Amino acid sequence: MKSDKKRIGVFVCHCGINIAGTVNIPEVVKRLKEQADVIEVIDHQYCCSDPGQNLIKETIKEKKLDSVVVACCSPTLHEPTFRKTVSSVGINPYNCEIANIREQCSWVTDDKEKATDKATKIIKTIIKKVEHDEPLTPITIPVTRKALVIGAGVAGIQTALDIATAGYPVILLDKNPSIGGHMSQLSETFPTLDCSQCILTPKMVEAKQHPNITLMTYSEIESISGYLGNFKVKVRQKAKYVDWDKCTGCDVCVDKCPKKTPDEFNHGLTQRKAIYKMFPQAVPNRVVIDAPNCLYLEKGACRLCEKHCPFGAIKFDDQDQITELEVGALVMATGYELLDKQMLGSYGFGKLKNVVDGLQFERILSASGPFMGEVKRPSDGKIPEKVVFVQCAGSRDPENAMAYCSKICCMYTAKQAILYKHRVHHGEPIIFYIDVRTGGKGFEEFYKRATDEGVLYIRGKVSKIFEKGDKVIVWGADTLTGKKIEVEADLVVLSTAMKPAATKEFAQLLKLTQDEYGWFTEAHPKLRPVETLAGGFFLAGACQGPKDIPEAVAQSSGAASKVIGLFTSDTLEHLPVIAGVNEDMCSGCGICIDVCPYKARELVTTEDGKKRTVKVIEVLCEGCGACSAACPVGAAQQKNFKDQQIQDMVKGGLE
C-alpha cells in the first residue's frame, strides 16, 4: 500500500544541452512541485558531478527526505552512482530511482514542447513508483575462488596466467589436444615480424608449469548450472586412446602409423597420421588417436602404434570422461574461425588448389609448415613468381557475406606480402584492396614499408578468380583509373573474413547473448567491454569481435582483473530486486517455472504438507519479470515492480 510518510525529492539534470537543449527544465520543475508527496524539486547542470551529488546529499539532510528520484540519463550509466550517493546519507539505495529523460525523451525529438510534456510524464511515473518502493537488502552469497577459462589461444593463456599469478586456481580448457590456438599457426606477427612461436611457446610452457593452472585439453563443455560465484560445470574429456601419464611424446607411434588424413593444423595442405601431435611445440606434448580414422578402432585391424610404443601408453579401451567442476567465474576466450569456403565460390576457394586463405598461407610461410618455410604452390610445389592477395574476401560485404571489417586483414596481408618478397626476392606481390586501414601503433609505418619493398597495391574489387592452364586468372577493376584488370597469377591468397568460433548452440548453453553475426555481446561497449549481462561470465580476445594479438592480450588482462576483483571478497552481493511468491495465492500450477529462463523457481510442498507451492532460489533470480507476467493468479510479484505499483505508474503518466 501507498505510504503517507514518503518524503520524496526530485533532482532534474540538464546534462549540459543533452537534455536541456530539448526539454524546458524550469517548466518541468514548476509542474513537478505541484505533485503530492514531493517535498523538493531541484535542477542542476550535471547531477552526476561531485557538486551535483553533494547537492543531493545536502538536500536529503535538510529536507529529511527518505526517497529520491533523479531525472537524467539511462539508469544503466548512473543508477549505481546515485544509489551510492543516497546510501551515504542514510537512505536505502533501492528507494532511489532514475527517470530516463535523455535517451527516452530529449534524444528522440526536436519538439521542445512535446519533449517537456513527455519528460514531465516520465518523471511522474517514477515518482509513483518510488512511492511504493520498499527498502531492500542485497542477497549475500559465497564465492568459489576458482576460475574456468574456455579457450586456450593466446587470449585464454594470458587470462589464465594473470588470474593464476594473483594466487587463484584456474582451469584452462580447450577443445583441441594442445593449447595455443590460431597464434600457434602463424609464421611471424606484425608489425615487428617477431616469430609467432618464439613469443607464444614460452607462454604455453609457463601455463603448463604454473602451479595454479590445470590444463584440460581435448575437452568440451557439456552443461553449466549455478550462478555468479558458484557455478557447476560438467566437462566432457574426450577419449584420447593414449595414457598421457605414460606417453612421452617420442612420436615412435606416429612414425609407424600407416593411416593418413588431412591435417587440420596445416589447413589441409598436408596430411597427418591417425595418431598424431598437433604441432612440434604442442603443449601438452602428447599424442592422441583420431578414432574415426584409426584402422583398429574403425575396422579392427592394425594396432602398430600399440606394438611399437616403448612405454605401453596406447589405450584402445579409453572412454570419454565427464568431470564436474565448481568455479566462481568463467572467461570466454573461444576465439574465431575463418569464413566458410562455400561463401567464397566466386573466388574459387575450396575448388582451385592454388587459391588459399590467409591461415593456409601462414602455414606455407612457417618454418614448421608443409614446405618448411619455402614458398611453394600447393598444386605442384613450384615457387610462385606472382602472388595476388585479395583483401576483404567476405568482409565488408553485406549482400553476400559479412558486413563488418575483420580488422586485422590489411596488416597481415602487408606482412605476408613482405615475407613473400623476403623468401622470393624476384617475386611480384600484388594486393587488391578497397582501402587500407592501419589503426594501430606502428601500423602505418609497416604499410609504408610494404610499398617501399615493392608490394604493388591496386585499389579495386576482385570479381572472379578461375584457372587457365597452370595459372590463376584474377579479374578485377582499378577504381582509381576506372579500368578493368586481368592478372595472371601463380597463387592467390584470400584475406578471409573472421567469424566467431562459438556457435549459437554453445551460446545458448551458456545463456550468453550474441550479435547478429554470432560474436558475444558485452554488457556495455564502452564502460563494461569485458563483462556480459550474465553475472560471472567475462569476455577475452576475439570471441567478442575481430582483434589483433596485442588487443586480444590487453582485453584478456582486463577480463582477468575483473575475475581477480570478484575473488577478493569471501562473499558477493546479488541484487534483491527479485520476483517472490505469495504462498497464500500460489496454486502450484508451475507455469512460472516453465517460463523462468534462469531456473530460479521450483515446486515444493508447504511445511504443513497441505499444498504445493513455488519456491524462489533467490540467488538465481535476475528479476526479468517473466514469471510475474505469466502467473495467472498474480502470486509472482517482483519486488519494487508489483502490479499495483505499475498500475499507479501508468495512471501517473496519464495525469
Image (cartoon, grey):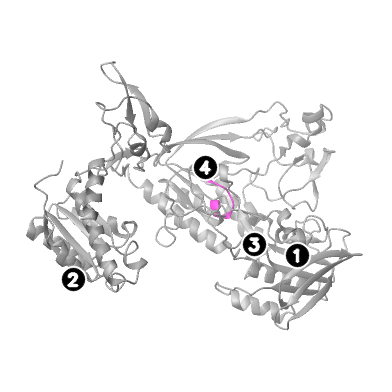
Which residue, given by chain and number where applicable, does mark 2 sit on? 26
- Residue 508's disc is 4
Mark 1 or mark 2: name the one nearer the start of the chain: 2
> Residue shown at 64%/75% (left/top)?
435
Q: Secondary structure at mark 4?
A: helix
Q: Amino acid at mark 4?
A: Gln
Q: Amino acid at mark 3?
A: Glu
Mark 4 or mark 2: name the one nearer the start of the chain: 2
Which one is nearer the viewer's eye here, 425 or 414? 414
Mark 3 or mark 1: name the one nearer the start of the chain: 3
Mark 3 or mark 4: name the one nearer the start of the chain: 3
Mark 1 or mark 4: name the one nearer the start of the chain: 1
Q: Secondary structure at mark 1?
A: strand
Q: Position of residue 265 (x, y in %)?
A: 72, 50
Q: Which residues are magenta?
A: 150-157
- Mark 1 vs mark 2, foreground winner is 2
Which residue, given by chain and number where applicable, does mark 3 sit on? 399
**Within 10 Å of the Cα at label 1, are there few (<14), some (14-19), or many (20+) other Cα atoms?**
many
Quarter-wise, where is residue 401 in the image? Answer: bottom right
Quarter-wise, where is residue 15 in the image? Answer: bottom left
- How far is mark 3 from mark 4, CA to CA? 27 Å
- How far is mark 4 from mark 2, CA to CA? 48 Å
Which residue, given by chain and number where applicable, does mark 1 sit on? 493
- Residue contact at pointers 1 and 2, CB within 8 angstroms: no
Q: Secondary structure at mark 2?
A: helix
Above or below for 279 versus 472: above
- How far is mark 3 from mark 2, CA to CA? 50 Å
Query: What is the quadrant of the N terminus in the image?
Result: top left
